[in-house]
């Protein structure tokens, strides 16, 4: 059976909003669509307003603690769309969901392929690896329980960020890697469309993986496209991987977890491990057509609402 009763964890984040909007667009194909509201955390006025907007469009708001079984009652599947520091919380959430009768879990992945050599051991993916191992264990213990990995490489809109050493406002970049190194990018809205489409494909095994890629682009192409969109020429400096690894070691020494994760991610990027190996599953859903690099970047730079949704107004921060 397809998965038609859905609870989304993290519905107000950058990607979560796109997933909810796509579920709303296709709501006639689902029995129940719900957004989880965590009562254990404070919510900004903007996020509270967003949740209320979802509710007016037919989304059920389920309130409680993410480790309470009651919040998962009646759902086929949970889609977890969590930030870096919350990914590790999925183990307790999975337990609560399974106890409530949930039989499928979409873990918070939505990035690179963890099975690419070296990724499994990388600090940035540590909590995703722990979650994968736990899902495998749970599927072995609980008959009928399964999970789906959805892999995109990176969201296209996240590529030109200060997090990776790119400062669009100044037209400058300090990139770990080399000009011709390829990476897989997928626009966030397209990624959400693919994810929702997979829900309507009935699982036949406990584990399944979908790979969707908008395109594989070199840094040269990315900066040429950014320059075209912005009417500027980027000043790009390429840094060695060892430099990022040294910064990561220093971050560990001073206990700066955010910097440690950022450096680990830059190492992954700088060694070409954000390139998703083929084959891809795009052709299973031919009605979904990824937008190109220029179109996606142009939309991001010209549409303030889009940047706000993505949480990307930091694109215009000063160089640090």
Image (spheres, rainbow, N blue to C red):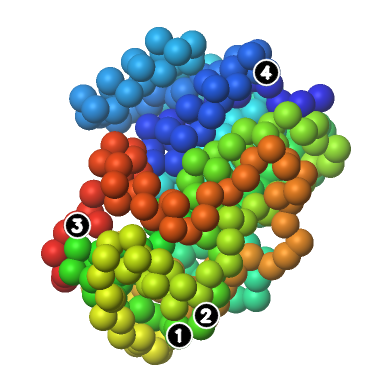
Which mark is first along the chain, 4 or 1? Answer: 4
Q: Which residue is mark 4?
A: 29
Tags 2 and 1 in contact by the CB under 8 Å rule?
yes
Dot 3: few (<14), some (14–19), or many (≥20) neighbours within 10 Å? some
Q: Position of residue 66 (x, y in %)?
A: 46, 29
Label 4, label 3: how far apart the Cα atoms are: 39 Å
- 259 horizontally vs 269: left or right: left
Q: Which residue is mark 1?
A: 178
Which residue occupies 50% across, 41% down? 189
Q: Residue 296's mark?
A: none
Asked if 86 appears above or below 243 in the picture, the reply is above
Tags 1 and 3 in contact by the CB under 8 Å rule?
no
Which mark is first along the chain, 3 or 1? Answer: 1
Which mark is first along the chain, 3 or 4? Answer: 4
Q: Position of residue 23 (x, y in %)?
A: 56, 25
Q: Position of residue 204 (x, y in %)?
A: 85, 38
Q: Position of residue 219 (x, y in %)?
A: 44, 75
Which residue occupies 39% across, 23% down? 37
Residue 103 lies in quadrant: top right
Residue placed most toward the observer, 39 or 198 = 198
Dot 2: few (<14), some (14–19), or many (≥20) neighbours within 10 Å? some
């Amino acid at each position: 059976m397809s998965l038609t009763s859905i609870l989304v964890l993290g519905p107000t984040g950058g990607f979560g909003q796109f997933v909810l909007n796509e579920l709303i667009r296709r709501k006639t194909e689902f029995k129940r669509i719900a957004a989880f509201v965590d009562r254990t955390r404070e919510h900004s006025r903007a996020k509270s307003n967003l949740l209320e907007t979802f509710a007016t469009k037919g989304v059920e708001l389920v309130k409680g603690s993410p480790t309470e079984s009651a919040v998962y009652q009646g759902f086929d599947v949970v889609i977890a769309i969590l930030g870096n520091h919350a990914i590790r919380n999925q183990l307790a959430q999975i337990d609560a969901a399974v106890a409530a009768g949930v039989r499928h879990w979409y873990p918070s992945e939505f990035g690179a392929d963890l099975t690419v050599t070296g990724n499994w051991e990388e600090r940035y993916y540590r909590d995703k690896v722990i979650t994968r191992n736990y899902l495998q264990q749970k599927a072995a213990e609980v008959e009928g329980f399964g999970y789906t990995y959805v892999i995109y490489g990176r969201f296209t809109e996240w590529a030109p960020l200060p997090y990776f050493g790119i400062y669009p406002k100044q037209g400058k970049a300090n990139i770990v890697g080399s000009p011709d190194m390829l990476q897989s990018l997928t626009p966030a809205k397209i990624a959400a469309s693919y994810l929702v489409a997979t829900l309507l494909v009935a699982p036949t095994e406990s584990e399944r993986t979908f790979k969707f890629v908008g395109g594989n682009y070199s840094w040269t192409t990315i900066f040429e496209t950014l320059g075209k969109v912005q009417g500027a020429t980027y000043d790009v400096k390429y840094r060695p991987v060892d430099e990022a690894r040294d910064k990561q070691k220093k971050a560990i020494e001073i206990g700066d977890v955010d910097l440690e994760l950022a450096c680990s991610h830059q190492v992954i990027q700088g060694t070409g491990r954000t390139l998703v190996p083929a084959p891809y599953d795009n052709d299973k859903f031919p009605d979904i057509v990824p937008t190109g690099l220029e179109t996606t970047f142009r939309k991001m730079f010209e549409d303030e609402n889009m940047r706000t949704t993505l949480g990307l107004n930091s694109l215009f921060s000063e160089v640090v």
